[in-house]
Image: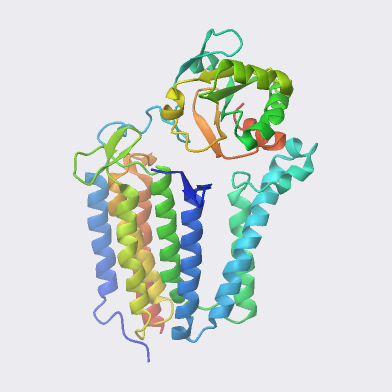
Amino acid sequence: MAAKLNGAGWTRRLALLAILAGGAWTWISRPQAPQAGADAPAARVGAFAPDFTLPALEDGRPLRLSDFRGRAVVINFWATWCPPCRVEMPALQQAQRDMPDVVVLGVNQQESADNVSRFMREQGLDFPIALDTAGEVNRLYRVRALPTTCFVDRSGVIRDIVYGGPLTRALIESKVSGLR
Amino acid sequence: MAPIIQVFGFSVQAGPLATLVGFVAGLWLSSRLAALRHLDGGVINDAGFYGALAGLIAARAGYVVVYWPAYATEPLSALMPSLTALLPWTGWPAGLAVAGWIVWRKGLLRAGLFDVLAPGVALLAMGLAGAALLNGESPGQPTTLPWAVTIWGESRHPVPVYELAALAVIAPGCARLLRRDLPPGALALAALAAYAFARVVIDGFRADVPLLAGMRVTQLAGVVVCATALLMIERLTIDD
């Protein structure tokens, strides 16, 4: 024999209470201003990608992320000592070649320009590389593992972050197709 | 906030790990409690395992189909073990369909099953809240309260912690109520009502929820779900 839950119609009264109390709290707690900090630049999906300026490997000129606004950007955090980073480099190179409207930007993590140049030459890679020698952008983007890849759309909003690798050309292309 | 953690020298994505722990713990709990409703816990385990497997396969297949132009030239890369190439809209229905088919075939698809699943689902929800906490998702409104956490450079309400606290009450509450003689389905609806109301309260502190008429959509939905679940309990009881 099942217990009687509704001896005095209390679930109906509870529902009424939920509507009144819940509705009141929903109204009281509504944001009074644009939701504080929700649209601030941050290294998370849905937020504007934090801007940064780093020297380019090629010629040392400053590379600024916001200069690429209006184009989709793939930001790849990498290092030459990181095996999956090395494996995915040809896929990034091919993505840059196949999709000229997309910027593939490698952000090398705290290695010397000579070391990185040698690696790029040996691998036949020529997409833009920024040198994060002091790890400043690493901290800004809270990079916890290499490789980490951020997919930024044309308005500068991060649409996806892929932790780890190696990325395949197909995966890069599928992620980029949502950015253009 | 730690989206990547080190386990035995390996870098592991903390969010998926927390979700996996929640799923396994929830499945274990529900299968253990199944006997209280005279259900076969082994069938629940099978449904959970094969449902998850089917969901993952369908999610990957859906992703590959949607982005086929990218995969056409290297179809083998569809087999890469990556958690990012998944399409939820194909994965969830397929997983639920397979799990549902298994329990239906074994004659378990009845209201009492949802009562048994309620505490397990609460544990899964704890895993998801833990994942949100570790990934720095669901940022709360800025606050100076002593238990604030720093998310994206600002002290904020720890919304996932509030959710974990609510679920830490709901999950054992469900497990205890399973031992009482309640109409089938009543416990699952009570758990749904409790969780929905908890979200109404907790989401009042969130900073990232879409608005409708100036109010948070999730809070409005929570009020509707909570009231509906409670009214359905009344119907269940009367029908019984």
B114 is higher (above) or lower (below) than B52 = below
Query: Residue A83's spot in the image, x, y percent?
Result: 64, 36
Q: Nearer the viewer, residue B207 or B239?
A: B207
Viewport quadrant of the N terminus of chain B: top left
| Front-lying residue, A85 or B71 | A85
Q: Is residue B44 left or right of residue B70?
A: left
Residue drawn at x 40%, y 78% as measured from the top left = B236
Residue B211, percent across and down?
36, 40
Q: Is residue A164 above or below residue A125?
A: below
For residue A161, side relative to residue B202 (left or right): right
Residue shown at 70% from the left, 39% from the top: B67
The answer to whether one can see residue B199 in this image is: no
**Quadrant of the frame with the C terminus of chain B:** bottom left
Give the quarter of the image for residue B107. Answer: bottom right
Across the whole image, how many numbered discs are drawn on residues?
0
The part of the image, by quadrant, that contains residue B43 is bottom right
Q: Give residue B228's position: percent from left, percent from top.
A: 37, 64
What is the basis of the colouring in this image? rainbow
Nearer-the-camera pick, B232 or B62: B62
- Residue at the image position 45 percent from the left and 43 percent from the top: B3
> Picture coordinates of residue A39 (x, y %)?
38, 30
